[in-house]
Amino acid sequence: MRLTEIYSSDSQTADYIESACARTCKPLGEVESSAATEFPGIIGRSHALRQVLRLIEIVAPTDSGVLLLGQTGTGKELIARAIHDRSRRRNHPFVKLNCAAIPTGLLESELFGHERGAFTGAIAQRVGRFELANSGTILLDEIGEMPLELQPKLLRVLQEREFERLGSTRTVRTDTRLIAATNRDLPAMVEEQKFRSDLFYRLNVFPIRIPALRERPEDIPLLARHFAQQFARCINKGIGSIPLETMNALCQYSWPGNIRELQNVIERGVLLASGPVLEFEFLDMTINDSAPAVSDQAQAGSNSPGKLQRILDETERKEILAALKTSRWVIAGINGAAALLGMKRSTLQVRMQKLGITRSARPA
């Protein structure tokens, strides 16, 4: 099946993907410099990605906080690093912490530090991440996992730029820029009283929505070639090219794990390759195992272009409705739904009209 049969709603995108796929049959060493952006580690030329990079250029020189929104595996840490590297703080520390990776009882100490004897096992003074990041940038990933009881202290740091270490009464001042990241629906968590509304509004100064990989399919060939070349170099393997059929299969997959999943698939392919051509004999099994479960009826029609288009439309509809909910149905502007989706206002309005999304559907 040709990609134009799947992406029939955007022939220009489909043509671009096919031309990009065709270029992947060239030796992997011939990586086009235009595949990489001016931001280290960020690969792609899609409109959705360019919109994100434009927002980075706008916010990076300021000290405004940034909220990165996107599914897991979309590259939120790379975007945070790009913001830091383009800011006046670039010569100071970039400190990162995954709020979901630290036990609740230790998270406060990790963030703000503690004094000796503050709790059992505190045998020495510890400097927290906010002190380490003074004059620099701190990335709090998975911010939606932060316990409710700790959120007021974080809010105070953002508003007053001061805090106390655990077991201390001395106030510590800090000049740290916060970048928060999450794959959770924070407005829904606020409504469910699982996240403080005042903290959400403080974090939501400049939201940037990072598109899922399925929303930027024209970047898949570029990313695949980049990862293949990278892994082949690491293990000193002579991978010469990626066949067009293989690349078509990669472009047709929905990638629920996003760029991280693509990276892992390419790494396995390089490890299993027995010759200079990167082929995936195991690709169908990988896709079936990792793709979301579907009903027998949907599976029977999964090879139909019409069925695939309906799935794509439904996915796009959900993404647009989520963005409209986040922006409170404001379409234009820096915090509008169009900016969150990484598209022009006129383009979003056309897509809304095609998908039957109107203001009358707005929840009461």
Image (cartoon, rainbow, N blue to C red):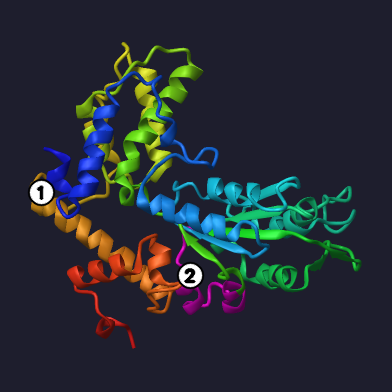
Can residue 130 be seen here? yes
Relative vertical location of residue 302 with respect to residue 189 in this rendering, above or below: above
Q: In x, y percent, where is residue 238? A: 39, 12
Quadrant hosting residue 252: top left
Q: Which residue is mark 1?
A: 305
Q: In x, y percent, where is residue 222? A: 36, 34
Q: Residues within 10 Å of mark 2 (few under 14, many from 20)?
A: some
Can residue 71 be seen here? no
- Residue 334's label in the rendered image is 2
Quarter of the image containing the N terminus? Answer: top left
Q: Is residue 200 magenta?
A: yes
Picture residue at 34% right of the left edge, 88% below the top: 364
Q: Residues within 10 Å of mark 1 (few under 14, many from 20)?
A: some
Relative vertical location of residue 61 with respect to residue 299 in this rendering, above or below: below
Relative vertical location of residue 317 with respect to residue 281 in this rendering, above or below: below
Picture residue at 32% right of the left edge, 12% below the top: 276
Residue type pointed to by label 2: Ile
Label 1 or label 2, whichever comes before in sequence order: 1
Picture residue at 54% right of the left edge, 49% below the top: 79
Residue type pointed to by label 1: Pro
In the displayed structure, does residue 46 sit left or right of residue 355? Answer: right
Tag 2 secondary structure: loop
Q: Are marks 1 and 2 in contact (CB under 8 Å)?
A: no
In the displayed structure, does residue 5 sit left or right of residue 83? Answer: left
Tag 1 secondary structure: helix
In this view of the protein, which residue sits in the foreground, 129 or 247? 247
The stretch of residues the image draws in magenta is 182-201
